[in-house]
Image (cartoon, rainbow, N blue to C red):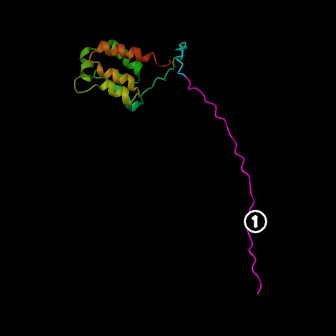
Amino acid sequence: MPTKTAVKPTVKKTSKVASVHKVAKVAPKKAVAKKATVKKATKKEPTFKALVCAADGECFWTRDGRILQNLDDLHMAFGSMDEEVFLHHVNKEKNDFADWVEHILDDLDCSVELRKSKELAKAHKILQSHLQKYSVA
């Protein structure tokens, strides 16, 4: 009978070299107060919007028969409008001018301020200030 010889598996011995890394201890950074920097105000050029004119079917017809197409027309109308005509369009239940400015002329900021105004002179001043935001083309 043949003899069985034990076969030992060949195992390569690898030497592991222990590498020692020195970890440097770093002190935690202290919080340093930053100096407040003052930004210089840059002069911005004002941006102007184009004055929106209502289409023929969307013009504003005042009680006294005037036909208004834009904010400039409304501003001029407020300059010579009777208090009675103004109060016909502006009262506790409604503000026709503010509605028209918001929905037709698409100027939400102006309409919000007009809604707060229940006096003709104040509404006239509001329009005057808002017209400065528009280009004269």
Q: Residue at x 38, y 26 (%)?
A: 108
> In the rendered view, would you say 97 is above or below 43?
below
Q: Closer to the camera, 34 or 31?
A: 31
Chief secondary structure of the magenta portion: loop
In the rendered image, residue 38, in percent from the top left (x then y), is placed at: 53, 13
Q: Residue at x 37, y 31 (%)?
A: 103
Query: 48 left or right of 25?
Result: left
Q: From this viewpoint, is residue 101 visible? A: yes
Decide: few, some or many residues near mark 1? Use Cα within 10 Å; few <14, some 14-19, many ≥20: few
Q: Closer to the camera, 130 or 45?
A: 45
Is 18 in the magenta?
Answer: yes
In the rendered image, residue 1, in percent from the top left (x then y), is placed at: 76, 87
Q: Which residues are magenta?
A: 1-29
Residue at mark 1: 10
* Callout 1 secondary element: loop
Query: 43 left or right of 94?
Result: right
